[in-house]
Amino acid sequence: EALNVFYYLTYEGAVNLEELEPALREAVEAQILFFGQTPAQLLTKPHPKRRPRAGLGPSLQMFSRPEGVKPYGPLWFGSRGGRGGPPDPIVFVGVPPPQAERLLTVSRSGVVLHHKWYPLKP
Protein backbone atom coordinates (compact mmCIF):
# COMPACT_ATOMS: atom_id res chain seq x y z
CA GLU A 1 0.00 0.00 0.00
CA ALA A 2 1.29 3.42 -0.93
CA LEU A 3 2.12 6.03 1.66
CA ASN A 4 0.71 9.23 0.19
CA VAL A 5 2.54 12.25 1.55
CA PHE A 6 1.35 14.99 -0.80
CA TYR A 7 -1.91 16.92 -0.68
CA TYR A 8 -4.66 14.55 -1.84
CA LEU A 9 -5.86 16.79 -4.69
CA THR A 10 -2.43 16.64 -6.34
CA TYR A 11 -2.72 12.92 -7.14
CA GLU A 12 -3.86 11.95 -10.62
CA GLY A 13 -7.49 10.85 -10.63
CA ALA A 14 -8.10 11.84 -6.99
CA VAL A 15 -11.14 13.92 -7.89
CA ASN A 16 -13.58 13.92 -10.80
CA LEU A 17 -13.94 17.58 -11.74
CA GLU A 18 -16.92 16.87 -14.01
CA GLU A 19 -19.06 15.83 -11.02
CA LEU A 20 -18.47 19.00 -8.99
CA GLU A 21 -20.68 22.09 -8.84
CA PRO A 22 -19.16 25.09 -10.67
CA ALA A 23 -18.16 27.01 -7.51
CA LEU A 24 -16.59 23.94 -5.87
CA ARG A 25 -14.92 22.95 -9.13
CA GLU A 26 -13.31 26.40 -9.39
CA ALA A 27 -12.01 26.12 -5.80
CA VAL A 28 -10.63 22.60 -6.36
CA GLU A 29 -8.95 23.64 -9.62
CA ALA A 30 -7.36 26.60 -7.81
CA GLN A 31 -5.99 24.24 -5.12
CA ILE A 32 -4.63 21.87 -7.76
CA LEU A 33 -2.95 24.79 -9.53
CA PHE A 34 -1.51 26.04 -6.23
CA PHE A 35 -0.12 22.68 -5.06
CA GLY A 36 0.80 21.33 -8.51
CA GLN A 37 0.33 17.73 -9.60
CA THR A 38 2.19 14.76 -8.18
CA PRO A 39 3.63 12.52 -10.91
CA ALA A 40 2.07 9.06 -11.09
CA GLN A 41 5.56 7.51 -10.83
CA LEU A 42 8.82 9.26 -10.05
CA LEU A 43 11.28 6.41 -10.58
CA THR A 44 11.11 3.62 -13.12
CA LYS A 45 13.75 1.34 -11.63
CA PRO A 46 14.51 0.37 -8.02
CA HIS A 47 17.14 2.17 -5.97
CA PRO A 48 20.57 0.51 -6.14
CA LYS A 49 21.50 -1.65 -3.17
CA ARG A 50 23.84 -0.17 -0.60
CA ARG A 51 27.45 -1.19 -0.83
CA PRO A 52 28.92 -3.04 2.14
CA ARG A 53 30.65 -0.77 4.64
CA ALA A 54 34.01 -2.43 3.91
CA GLY A 55 33.74 -1.44 0.24
CA LEU A 56 33.27 2.26 0.90
CA GLY A 57 36.97 3.07 1.12
CA PRO A 58 38.82 5.14 3.70
CA SER A 59 36.97 7.45 6.03
CA LEU A 60 37.01 11.14 5.17
CA GLN A 61 37.52 12.15 8.78
CA MET A 62 40.15 14.70 9.64
CA PHE A 63 41.30 12.81 12.75
CA SER A 64 41.95 9.11 13.22
CA ARG A 65 40.15 9.17 16.62
CA PRO A 66 37.42 11.86 16.47
CA GLU A 67 35.98 10.66 19.79
CA GLY A 68 39.13 11.95 21.46
CA VAL A 69 38.74 15.48 20.09
CA LYS A 70 37.47 17.95 22.66
CA PRO A 71 36.30 21.51 22.01
CA TYR A 72 38.36 24.23 23.63
CA GLY A 73 37.17 27.73 24.33
CA PRO A 74 36.23 30.07 27.15
CA LEU A 75 32.74 28.57 27.58
CA TRP A 76 30.81 25.47 26.63
CA PHE A 77 27.75 26.13 24.50
CA GLY A 78 24.70 26.54 26.71
CA SER A 79 26.65 27.43 29.84
CA ARG A 80 25.38 30.00 32.33
CA GLY A 81 27.15 32.66 34.30
CA GLY A 82 30.55 32.04 32.74
CA ARG A 83 30.84 28.49 34.11
CA GLY A 84 31.25 25.55 31.85
CA GLY A 85 28.16 23.42 31.41
CA PRO A 86 28.09 19.65 31.32
CA PRO A 87 30.31 18.33 28.54
CA ASP A 88 28.72 17.19 25.30
CA PRO A 89 31.51 15.17 23.67
CA ILE A 90 32.21 15.51 19.97
CA VAL A 91 31.60 12.19 18.22
CA PHE A 92 32.39 13.28 14.66
CA VAL A 93 34.79 15.83 13.19
CA GLY A 94 35.07 16.27 9.47
CA VAL A 95 36.16 18.70 6.79
CA PRO A 96 33.54 19.00 4.05
CA PRO A 97 35.37 18.97 0.71
CA PRO A 98 36.72 21.09 -0.91
CA GLN A 99 36.83 23.70 1.87
CA ALA A 100 39.83 23.15 4.11
CA GLU A 101 39.02 26.25 6.17
CA ARG A 102 35.70 24.80 7.37
CA LEU A 103 35.12 22.14 9.99
CA LEU A 104 31.95 20.21 10.81
CA THR A 105 31.42 18.70 14.27
CA VAL A 106 28.61 16.57 15.67
CA SER A 107 28.17 16.13 19.42
CA ARG A 108 26.86 13.07 21.25
CA SER A 109 23.49 14.79 21.70
CA GLY A 110 23.23 15.40 17.95
CA VAL A 111 24.18 19.08 17.84
CA VAL A 112 25.76 19.86 14.48
CA LEU A 113 28.13 22.81 14.40
CA HIS A 114 29.83 24.40 11.41
CA HIS A 115 33.12 26.10 12.25
CA LYS A 116 35.30 28.39 10.16
CA TRP A 117 38.78 29.64 10.80
CA TYR A 118 41.20 31.91 9.00
CA PRO A 119 44.64 30.34 8.67
CA LEU A 120 47.63 32.52 9.45
CA LYS A 121 49.34 33.73 6.31
CA PRO A 122 53.13 34.15 6.25
Image (tube, helix red, strand yellow):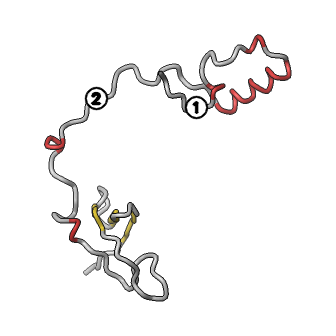
Rendered view: 47 above or below 12: below
| Front: mark 2 or 1 | 1
- Toward the top, the furthest residue is 18
| Quadrant in which residue 101 is drawn | bottom left
The correct choice, above or below, for 70 with respect to 45 in the image is: below
The residue that appears at 34% across and 75% down in the rendered structure is 87
**Mark before the other along the chain sequence, 2 or 1:** 1
The local crowd at label 1, few if under 14, some if 14 to 19, many if 20 or more residues have their Cα within 10 Å, is few
- Total number of numbered discs in the rendering: 2
The residue labelled by disc 1 is: 6
Spot occupied by residue 115 in the image (x, y as percentages of width and height): 37, 69
**Residue 119 screen position, x and y as percent:** 30, 75
- Label 2 Cα neighbours within 10 Å, binned few <14 / some 14-19 / many ≥20: few
Name above or below for residue 25 compared with residue 86: above
Does 101 sit left or right of 25 as displayed? left
Above/below status of 59 relative to 87: above
Q: Is residue 107 left or right of residue 25?
A: left
- Report the amino acid beneath label 2: Pro
- Helix, strand or loop under label 1: loop
Q: Quadrant of the C terminus?
A: bottom left
**Amino acid bearing label 1:** Phe
- What's the residue at 65%, 32% (across, down)? 35
Q: Which residue is mark 2?
A: 48
